[in-house]
Image (tube, helix red, strand yellow):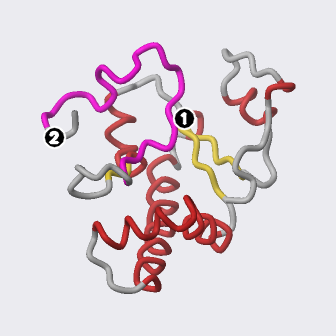
C-alpha cells in the first residue's frame, strides 16, 4: 500500500481493531525490512480516530530481546538484508533506532496525549489499557505474558 500510495491499512484485515508489530523482516522476497512503527505519522493522519501505544522497556533489555529473537534469526536476517558484516554494527543500528524512535514519537505526540499511551511492558498492565481504551472490554483472566524470555 505504501509503494502505491494507498492508505497503509487498506485491505489489511478490516475487521481488526488493533494492529501491532507491523514488520516485514523475514520475507525472502522483501528487498529490505519494513518497519511499520516508522510510519506512525502516516497512520496518525490516515486514521484520525486511531490511538497509539508506545511500548517501552530499558534499552539493554530490548537489545537483548532483538538479538535473541528467533534464536538469532532476526539479527542474521537484518545483517544479511542490509549487508552488515558484524553483529556489533547491527546492534549499534538497533540502538540508534531505539533512541530515534522514542524521541520522534514523544515529540510528535507531546501535544496529543489523548492519542498516545506510553506502556512500560515491565510495569504496566491491563488497567492502563482499559483506561486508554474505555470502549474495549479487556478480560483480566485472558491477560497473559507471552515471549517472556525475549
What is the spatial separation of the Cα atoms under label 1 and label 2, in whole angstroms?
A: 26 Å
Q: Please name the residue that numbered disc 2 is placed on.
A: 3
Q: Indicate yes or no whether the magenta region holds residue 5.
A: yes
**Label 2's element?**
loop
The tally of labels here is 2
Front-lying residue, 6 or 79: 79
Front-lying residue, 108 or 111: 108
Residue drawn at x 32%, y 29% as measured from the top left: 46
Q: Main secondary structure of the magenta part?
A: loop
Where residue 138 sits, quadrant-wise, is top right
Of callouts 1 and 2, the N-terminal one? 2
Range of magenta residues: 4-25
Residue drawn at x 30%, y 20% as measured from the top left: 11
Where residue 136 sits, quadrant-wise, is top right
| Mark seen at residue 115 | 1
| Mark seen at residue 104 | none
Amino acid at each position: 500500500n505504501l509503494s502505491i500510495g494507498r492508505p497503509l491499512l487498506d485491505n489489511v484485515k478490516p475487521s481488526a481493531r488493533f494492529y501491532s508489530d507491523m514488520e516485514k523482516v523475514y520475507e525472502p522476497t522483501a528487498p529490505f525490512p519494513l518497519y511499520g512503527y516508522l510510519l506512525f505519522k502516516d497512520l496518525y493522519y490516515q486514521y484520525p480516530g486511531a490511538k497509539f501505544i508506545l511500548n517501552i522497556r530499558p534499552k539493554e533489555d530490548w537489545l537483548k530481546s532483538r538479538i535473541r529473537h528467533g534464536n538469532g534469526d532476526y539479527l542474521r536476517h537484518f545483517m544479511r538484508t542490509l549487508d552488515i558484516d558484524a553483529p556489533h554494527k547491527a546492534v549499534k543500528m538497533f540502538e540508534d533506532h531505539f533512541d530515534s524512535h522514542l524521541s520522534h514519537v514523544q515529540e510528535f505526540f507531546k501535544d496529543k496525549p489523548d492519542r498516545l499511551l506510553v506502556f512500560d511492558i515491565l510495569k504496566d498492565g491491563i488497567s492502563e489499557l482499559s483506561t486508554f481504551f474505555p470502549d474495549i472490554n479487556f478480560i483480566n483472566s485472558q491477560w497473559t505474558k507471552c515471549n517472556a524470555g525475549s
